[in-house]
Image (tube, helix red, strand yellow):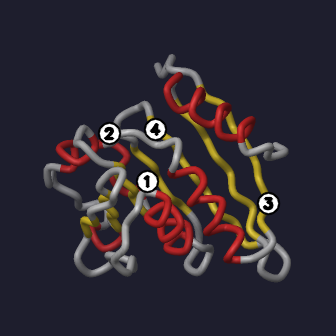
Amino acid sequence: MNNIGEEVFHITTEAPEQTMKFAEKLAHYLQEGNLILLEGDLGAGKTTFTKGLAKGLGVTRNVNSPTFTIIKEYQGEKLPLYHMDVYRLGESMEDLGFDEYFEGNGVTVVEWAHLIEDQLPLSRLEIELYHREGDKREICLKAKGSEYIDLCKEFIKDENISN
């Protein structure tokens, strides 16, 4: 049984630029070893969100989806960003050493993380992106574990974001 605690926060953005800015601000609260799981339909904004995180971490390279390479590494001024897309691995996943990234010195973002659920740490920040009317996106932050709950509460409070 999972006893690590969980809190959920909902935010709506009006346009892709606002989604990216939200992620950029969130990046300022991230620390070494943080794990973010991104879920959402195709076109929901996962790569846009990751581009915002990268900008907030000081990554200057162009960020795009690692669909065919599985993992892309970016060096940021603040922290490295490890961007994974495990969609093509499917459920026939074997141990590819992901834990080295999850426990590493950067921030790890995993798209389609439900496909490798059995390899993920319990403590993490799950972010679900949903299409809404027009360019609106609902962003659901599911903080699992006290570290991520505290991170989200501080971020929401400091950025004066209504939940």
Quadrant hosting residue 88: bottom left
Q: Which residue is mark 3?
A: 12
Q: Which residue is mark 4?
A: 124
Between tags 2 and 1, which lies in front?
2
**Is the residue marked by circle 3 packed among few (<14), some (14-19), or many (20+) residues within 10 Å?**
some
User: Which residue is at 76% across, 48% downward?
Assistant: 10
Q: Nearer the viewer, mark 2 or mark 4?
A: 2
How far apart are the two marked residues, 3 and 4, measured between alpha carbons? Answer: 21 Å
Q: Are marks 2 and 1 in contact (CB under 8 Å)?
A: no
Give the quadrant of the C terminus. Answer: top right
Q: CA distance from mark 3 to mark 1?
A: 23 Å
**CA distance separating discs 1 and 4:** 13 Å
Please state which of residues 34 and 27 is positioned toward the viewer in this rendering: 27
Density class for disc 2 (Cα within 10 Å; few <14, some 14-19, many ≥20) is some
Residue labelled with disc 1: 114
Q: Residue, x 16% and y 54% (percent of image)?
A: 94
Earlier residue among tags 3 and 4: 3
Residue 52 image point, x, y percent: 53, 66
| Local SS, label 3 | strand
Disc 3 to disc 2, C-alpha distance: 27 Å
